[in-house]
Image (tube, coloured by chain):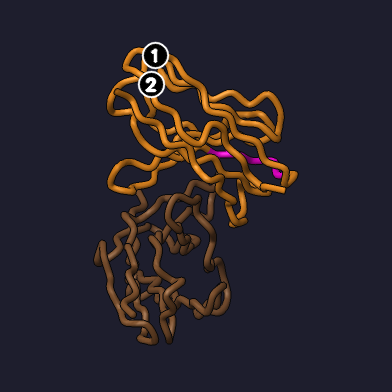
Amino acid sequence: DTAVSQTPKYLVTQMGNDKSIKCEQNLGHDTMYWYKQDSKKFLKIMFSYNNKELIINETVPNRFSPKSPDKAHLNLHINSLELGDSAVYFCASSQDPYRSYEQYFGPGTRLTVT
Amino acid sequence: AQSVTQLGSHVSVSEGALVLLRCNYSSSVPPYLFWYVQYPNQGLQLLLKYTTGATLVKGINGFEAEFKKSETSFHLTKPSAHMSDAAEYFCAVSEKQGAQKLVFGQGTRLTINP
């Protein structure tokens, strides 16, 4: 019954590795997002997809590549992981990207790069 | 560019006391305004939002916030704090035009003393 789910919840990996985080929403929403929360709890949007189309792409290193196979899924692939990528990554979804609808957040994936 | 400032990274109040969390925004036009709450090791949950209309907005768990255009503020209040209110609180804004992109403040950690 979870509205927005993410896997894995924790991810520990070494520098230079490639990893993916998966997100799924069962709310029937058209729009999904990725946010990054750093060690100081600062949250910043990374990407947004609407109906599988990329509509927001913030200044993010191109090592980060989102992929949306369908409206209910938005995955985040990270190449050549760096220490600075350590953070909590949140997926979110909303009904419509152009109105002030609530964004529903997943529980987060804590990524630790050693 | 929009920005959000939350005054006080840490606020501590006694149980039963008034909670006041401050948020000021910078935007060329009044944006949509949100308060989100994050409990430990969880994702964010919407408390309340202001889009248009009445400037005093009521949310969940007894919280409310007032939009003051002249002060560019959207402070969050609760008349009587409960132990369960202990959490991290984030103020966020998004522009009324274009794809919704939440810009968050740095967060305020609320501690409730028994």
Location of residue B20 by image quarter: bottom left
Along the line of sight, the residue nearer the viewer: A50 or A23: A23
Q: Residue shown at 67%/47% (left/top)?
A: A2
Chain coloured brown in the rendered structure: B
- Secondary structure of the residue carrying numbered label 2: strand
Q: Residue at x 68, y 49 (%)?
A: A95
Chain A is shown in which shade? orange
Which residue carries the number 2 mark? A13
Q: Looking at the image, do the residues carrying marks 2 and 1 touch, with CB atoms under 8 Å apart?
A: yes
Magenta stretch, main secondary structure class: strand
**A87 left or right, relative to A6:** left
Amino acid on which disc 2 is placed: Thr
Q: Is residue A30 shown in magenta?
A: yes
**Res B51 → quadrant:** bottom right
- Give the residue number, with chain letter if any, for mark 1: A17
Alpha carbon separation for disc pair 2 and 1: 7 Å
Amino acid type, mark 1: Asn
Q: Position of residue A56 (x, y in %)?
A: 51, 35
Q: Which contiguous range is marked in magenta?
A: A29-33
Camera-side mark, 2 or 1? 2
Q: Relative to A43, is A6 on the left or the right? A: right
